[in-house]
Amino acid sequence: MERMYKNHAVRESVTLDGLWDFALANDRTTTTDTLTFDYRLMVPGCWETHPSLRTYRGMGVYRRQVRMERSGPIRLEFKGVSHTASVIWDGVEVASHYNAYTAFQVIVPFAEAGEHELVVWVDNSFGEHSSLHVPNDYYTYGGLIRPVVMESLNGPFVERIAFSPSGKIGAWRGMLEAEIINPDGEAREIRAEAELAGKKIAWGPIRMEPGQSLKLDWDGDVPGVREWSPKSPQLYDLNVLVYVDGDERASDDLIERVGFRTISTDDGRIQFNGEDIVLKGFNRHEDHPMAGASLTPSLMIQDIDLMLDMGANMVRTSHYPNDERFLDLCDERGLLVWEENHARGLSIEQMRNPNFIGQCEEVNREMVNQHYNHPCIVLWAILNECASDCEEGRVHYKRQLEQIRSLDSTRPLTFASHHRANEICFDLADIVSFNLYPGWYSDEDPGQLCDLARGWADAKGGAGKPMIMSEFGADGYYGMRDPSRVRGTEERQADIIEANLAAYTARPYLSGMLIWQFCDCRVTEGTGWLITRAGTQNSKGIVDRYRRPKLAYAVAKKYYSLIK
Ligand code: ADA
C-alpha cells in the first residue's frame, strides 16, 4: 500500500509490492547474467528478515518483470532504498540514488506495451561513498525498504503540489504552488484546475514546450474550513488536475491531503494555531524486530496509538526522514512531528567526507519537498549531535539551515545539541534543543541541569528562543526487575524518567520534552563505544522492540497527561 489515502483518481498507478528475485553480489557489474538469483524477497522489506541474511551487509540485486498494458511514458517511484540504489530498466541504467530515507523517481519517456525487466542494485555497505549511513546507534538495513510504485503517464503531469496554510482559526488562507512537467517530445497546450474544500481554481490554457517544467500558483482565502489540530485533525483533499490539448477529460492528477494550521515562535515560546504549546513526546526509530525498518501500516499505527495513549503530542523522527505512510497516519491521528534530516553524531572528521555536503543537500531538499504538505510536521531539524561546537562545523549548520529555510519559510528550524556550554550555533536556529542525560550518563540533577542549559542558550546566541529538551532517558532491559533498582533495571529507568519529567514539567520556560526513546532499537554491531550496547540494541525504549511496555510507560503517561 503506497499511501494511506488515494492520491490519484486519474493517473494509473500500481505498486510493485510482492516477491522479487534477489541475488547477492560482490561488486557492481553492468550485467546480471553472472549472478544467481537464489532468493525471492518481499518488497517492501529488509533483507535482514530472511533467515540467511540476518546480518548481511553489502550488495544485493532485486529483479522482476513488469507488465505494461499500453505503450507510453512511465514514472517509477522508489519510496526508499537502503541505502544506495542503481535502477536498470531493460538493461539500461535509468537512475541512481543515495540515502535510504527519501524517495526518488525515474521517468522512462517511452515504453512499449508488454513485459519489461526492472533490476535494482542495492548497497548498504559502509565506506567513504556513504557519509551519512555509518556504523551507528541504530541499524542501516538493506533492501527496497519502502514501496515501489509504477505509474502510466498521459503526457504533461503534476510533479508536485506545495500548499502553505496561513491566517487563523475562522479566517484561513492558503498558498498553492503546482509544478507540471511535459515529458513528451512535442509541445502541448494544457490547462489545470485545483479543487480544495469546495473551492475551484483554474489556470491556462498555457503552451508547454517539450520537456518543460511549469510552476502554477495561487494565493487566497479558503472560507468555511476547520483547523487541523491534535484534538481535531481535520484534513482536506487538494486535487490538481491537468487537461491537455483541449480534451474535456483530465489526463493527469495528484491529490495531496492538507490541513489548516500555523506554527510560529515568539517571546521564547512556540505557538500552534496562535496559542502557546508545550511539545511532549518521544524520539522514535523506524525499527521492529520482525520487520526491520519496513514497518507495515498496522505496526506504524500501533506505535502512534501507544504514544498517544501515553499522552504524547509529538514524535521526533530521529534521525532521518520517515516513511510517508507514517506521516499520513500522524496527519490522521493529530500527532505533531519533528522531522529531521539524516545524520547522527558525526564528528568533524566524518563531516569532512567529500560526499557529505552533496549528500546532505540532497536529503534536505528531498525531505522538505516530499513532505512539505503534511500538517503534522511542525519543525524541521538537521544534524543531530554533529560538530556544532567548532567553526568548521558551524559552516555546515549555517549552510543547511539556510537551504531548508529557502525551501520552506513556514516552519521553525532547530537542531539537537549535546555540546552544552561549547555549542556555537544556537543563533542560527529558531528553537534551541538539548540532548542531555542526567541520571544516566551523569549524576546531575535534571532540574539544575535544565536551568544551566537555559543559561548556556542565553549566553550563546539562543536568548529569547524557545527551548526543548530533545533527548533524555536511560537504559532499562525489558523484564529485568530488581528491588535494588540498579542501572539497567526497569525500576531504575522508571526512576530516571520520573526525575527528568518531574523537573521539566515544573519549568514553565520549557517548550518541549522528548524522551529518548519510544522503542528499543537494533544498533550496528560494533567495536568502540558501540560495544557498550548490550545485545546490540539501544535499550532506552519505554517499550521494548516488540512494543511491550516497561515500567517507565506508566511514568511517562502520568506526567504527559498532566500537560494540557
Ligand atoms: C544520543 C543520540 C541518540 C542515542 C542516545 C543514547 O543523544 O542522539 O541517537 O545514541 O544518545 O542512547 O546514548
Image: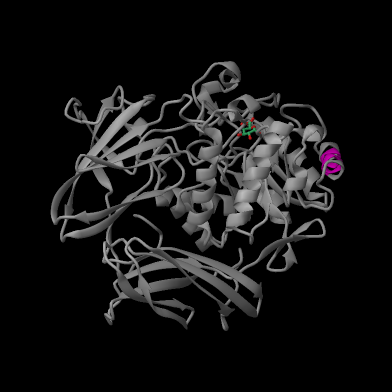
Q: Give, as a single range, the part of the protein colored magenta.
A: 451-457
Left or right: residue 263 versus residue 372 is: right
Residue 376: percent from left, percent from top: 57, 59
The magenta stretch spans residue 454: yes
The magenta stretch spans residue 163: no
Left or right: residue 36 versus residue 488 is: left
Left or right: residue 419 versus residue 364 is: right
**As rendered, which of 127 and 215 lies closer to the eye?**
215
Q: In this orientation, does residue 374 appear? A: yes
Its colouring scheme is one colour
**As rendered, which of 50 and 180 lies closer to the eye?**
180
Residue at 52% over, 19% down: 526
Q: In this orientation, does residue 314 appear? A: no
Residue at 53% over, 29% down: 354
Q: Tell me the quadrant of ligand 1.
A: top right
Residue 69: percent from left, percent from top: 15, 59
